[in-house]
Image (cartoon, rainbow, N blue to C red):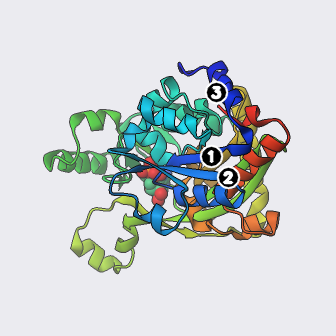
Amino acid sequence: MGKVKREKILEILDGYDKENITIATLGSHTSLHILKGAKEEGFRTAVVCEKGREIPYQRFHVADEFIMVDKFSDIVNEDVQQKLRDLNSIVVPHGSFVAYAGLDNVEDKFNVPMFGNRDILRWEAERDLERKLITESGIRMPKKYENPDDIDRAVMVKFPGARGGRGYFVASTTEEYNSKIENMLERKWITPDDVEKAHIEEYVSGCNYCIHYFYSVLKDEVEVLGMDSRYESNIDGLCRIPAKDQLEADLNPSYVITGNHPAVIRESLLPQVFENGDNLVETARKLVKPGMNGPFCLQGLCTDNLEIVVFEMSARIDGGTNTFMDSSPYSYLLFGEPMSMGRRISREIKNGINQGKLDVLIT
Ligand code: ADP
């Protein structure tokens, strides 16, 4: 629990005019459909926008208010927080919001009501906490290797920091690992400190599914709203070269996300999809009280044994929800009307206001 106290947030929320709530977020990541969805649910919208990045929000007409800042991280500045509170804002956190504002700042000095469980954000950011939450839910994760000497099959090596999938590599033996590390050190792509902190896990051969869930606290129900798979550079480009040419080209793979494809999974796998979501919500209830609240995403690989192996989790709206700014096949099944993850968040907030339960949705 950070220094932002729940009592303080509830006091601010208490002072809000509930007939005039603004849904606000940082202009990046999934903000277009968060704001669009908020407008569809009848809210006023505000975007905290870095100077020079305003074009999408102007051209797609999703924001009623622009709070301009020199840099994204200024969202935690006191004057920006005050503007947000003056607008009766509920802030929807997303990946870029957490990255630019900084987790410590979100926990310790962001005194604006936010949608969801603020405390769970750390659980997706720290690999060990993330692993605990996922494995204690009975969901399979790739085996983790503590020591490169133990490598006994294909592994994926990940480095820390905000470099995305840049520099991730695959190795099958300790020797291959050592030679690739040496080469990367020589080229100064990584530092000895990166090597210390390298995360080595089993390479899972399968198809990528990132599954977007919404846990409604009001309904006590886990919804599956959509799925995507990642479009990553340069690995997805490399795969278009015949194997012989790949060897000759001597290119190094990277896994930098550049976009997403919408996906659907075999219908027979849906029981597993729901079981994973339900179990994660149950475990979060015990480990990160009061638990999950709103969107989350399990990023996994489905093997030819038809097992979904989860390598990462988002405990807030995930970027892949941009694949269904209108609807996904699954959100259509549930709602029968255009329903994005952004709109689903605002629908929950609207229901919370109508039921006099907004406080349980806010952190
Ligand atoms: P980031 O933290 O940058 O999002 P990820 O851990 O999500 O990085 O991994 C980036 C990509 O690498 C994934 O989208 C997937 O394609 C691939 N990947 C990650 N972990 C594994 C794994 N254990 N086995 C196979 N591929 C993986």
Residue denoted by label 1: 22
Q: Which residue is mark 3?
A: 12
Residue 112's place in the image compared with 5, above or below, is below
Name the amino acid type tagged 3. Answer: Ile
Q: Which of pointers 1 and 3 lies earlier in the amino acid sequence?
A: 3
- Left or right of 267 on screen, residue 154: left
User: Badge 1: how crowded within 10 Å, few (<14), some, or many (20+)?
Assistant: many
Question: Residue at left 23%, top 49%?
Answer: 179
Quadrant of the image for the C terminus?
A: top right
Say whether residue 112 is left or right of residue 215.
left
- Determine whether label 1 and label 2 are within 8 Å by CB: yes
x, y percent for residue 98: 47, 40
- Left or right of 243 in this view: 324: right
State if disc 3 and disc 2 touch (CB < 8 Å): no
Q: Residues within 10 Å of mark 3 (few under 14, many from 20)?
A: some
Camera-nearest residue between 287 and 333: 333
Residue 121: image tag: none
Does dot 3 land on a helix, a strand or a loop? Answer: helix
Residue 267 percent location from the top left of the image: 76, 68
> Going 62% across and 20% down the picture, which residue do you hit?
8
Please provide percent x and percent y for residue 17: 70, 37
Amino acid carrying label 1: it is: Thr
Q: Amino acid at mark 2?
A: Phe
* SS for callout 2: loop
Q: Position of residue 325 (x, y in %)?
A: 61, 66
